[in-house]
Amino acid sequence: MPSEEKNELLRLIPRVDELADFAASASGAPREIACEVARSVTNRIRESIVSGRTFSRQELSLDSLGKLTVRELENLFKPSFKRVINATGVVLHTNLGRAPLSEEALNAIKETSQGYSNLEYRLSTGERGSRQEHLEGIICRLTGSESAFVVNNNAAAVLQVLTALARGREVIVSRGELIEIGDSFRLPDIMLSSGAKLCEVGTTNRTKLSDYREAIGPDTALILKTHMSNYRILGYSEEVSIFELSKLAHEHFIPLVEDLGSGSLIDLTPFGLEGEHTPMASIKAGADIVTFSGDKLLGGPQAGLVVGKAEYINAIRKHPLARALRIDKITVAALEATLREYLNPEKVLIRIPALKMLLDDEKNIEKKAKKLKRILDKEKPEKIQYEVVREFSTAGGGSLPLASLPTWCLKVKHSLHSAYETSRLLRESNPPVIARMKDDSILIDLRCIHEEEISMIADALLGIQ
Ligand SMILES: *Cc1c(COP(=O)(O)O)cnc(C)c1O
């Protein structure tokens, strides 16, 4: 484009203050921010023109660029963090926020956080208390432990336990348990940052009691056992039980620590879900310290629970890291309310959303899938083909890695778009719908879908152009 033509176009760009006035009055946003956005819009247009793009007079009008500025300005005020519909079927989807909170937990957050609370204040004496006091009693009652302490998440729990009990000394770990959980939780790295020295024993597939015994020396601080959360070693394999390991540890007057990962407070084996044992079972078998997450199978907020013998918990509690890893009042509220649900073992399976969805009857899920199909049938959509199919969903969150849970999905194919494109468009709907892909179709898994979300999914599917 000749430079005269470019200069002509550049002259047509509205002035920043004109655009800012337009956008500020149309959107009600403060003028200063409107000015910033207007400047960035005009800069962008100017650069496009300079690099050779042409625009019509209409495109460069105050009205047209003003509207663009208003749109960008309004986007600035929209939350980035928002609700989505989880149609993946993965109950504890870490990227989608893991465990949804129970009604009671949400109420407790509102009740205690809207105004003031007795977070660290003893109402009986009017003296300073500890936020941990709201949690310790109920955790001990539920897990059968002597003492308990809660930090920000399970990674923090492991870090704090190792730092407090093993800094500068050796920690014995089986080579089959040097885990990576994802999102850069690698056990060897956590050990390194705690200042503990890693003493690996056994092999990837087999570690025997004698391997541990031979490794114990004057510099050994503790034995660490890690739950294989998100993987299994099958076939020719051997690991040492908590019971045997705790006997060995106690013969040498060192503690046995277990990083349990999920730590379900309910034995899930009667429901056909193998592979997770409870913190109660570990403590009974002789573990001195057990750590587990608050937002995995427990079904509460993000937290790391440390349970076990008082002498060790006291040392852990006193370490200065405790202050850096301490939980927020919102966590205290949600965790206490979640834990109290477990006092009623019959109701807990319905009242904790993660447990309810995990153990839901296949027939209920099928009903929801059929309802979604019926809503679509009424609209007679021309561009999508769909059918109700039986599939399998997973627990997620590094829990129950081998469990495949029978579920029901709506399998959808769009006549104009690939599965990849269709799932992108579903993510753009409001609220975004996150689905699974399979064989160039998308699967809407109804396991984690609320009754009132079914019509939202239908709207999202019908809204795809
Ligand atoms: C999930 C998991 C962790 C990390 O827990 P967060 O609560 O996500 O920090 C650590 N160890 C094991 C064995 C796990 O399964």
Image: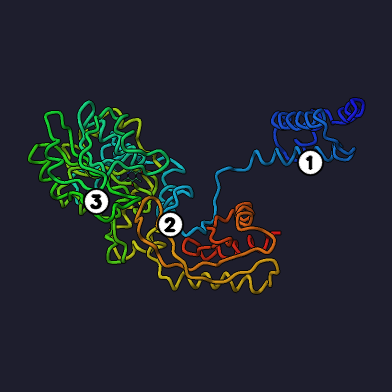
* x then y, percent, for residue 459: 64, 62
Q: Quadrant of ligand 1?
A: top left
Mark 3 highlights which residue? 279
Q: Residue at x 92, y 26 (%)?
A: 4
At label 1, which amino acid type do we have? Lys
Q: Mark 1 near mark 3, Cβ–Cβ under 8 Å?
A: no
Q: Which amino acid does the dot numbered 2 rest on? A: Val
Residue at disc 2, CB closer than 8 Å to ligand 1: no
Pick the front one: 180 or 9: 180
Residue that mark 1 sits on = 67
Disc number placed over residue 425 in the picture, else none: none
- Residue in front for this viewpoint, 401 or 321: 401
Q: Position of residue 386 (x, y in %)?
A: 60, 69
| Cα distance between the residues tagged 1 and 3 | 58 Å
Percent position of residue 306, x then y:
26, 42
The foreground one among 398 and 415 is: 415
- Looking at the rendered image, the quarter that the N terminus falls into is top right
Residue displayed at 28% across by 36% down: 129
Label 1 residue near ligand 1, CB within 8 Å: no
Q: Amino acid at mark 3?
A: Pro
At label 3, counting other C-alpha atoms closer than 10 Å, the crowd grade (few under 14, some 14-19, many 20 or more) is many
Q: Is residue 149 above or below residue 371?
A: above
Q: Are marks 3 and 2 in contact (CB under 8 Å)?
A: no
The residue closer to the viewer here, 308 or 189, is 189
Q: Residues within 10 Å of mark 2 (few under 14, many from 20)?
A: many
- Tell me the residue that label 2 is attached to: 91
Marks 1 and 3, the one that precedes in the sequence = 1
SS for dot 2: loop
| Vertical relation: 403 (above or below) 166 | below
Please determine whether, in this image, residue 393 is positioned above or below residue 128.
Answer: below
Residue 419: quadrant of the picture? bottom right
Relative horizontal placement of residue 160, taking residue 358 as reference (left or right): left
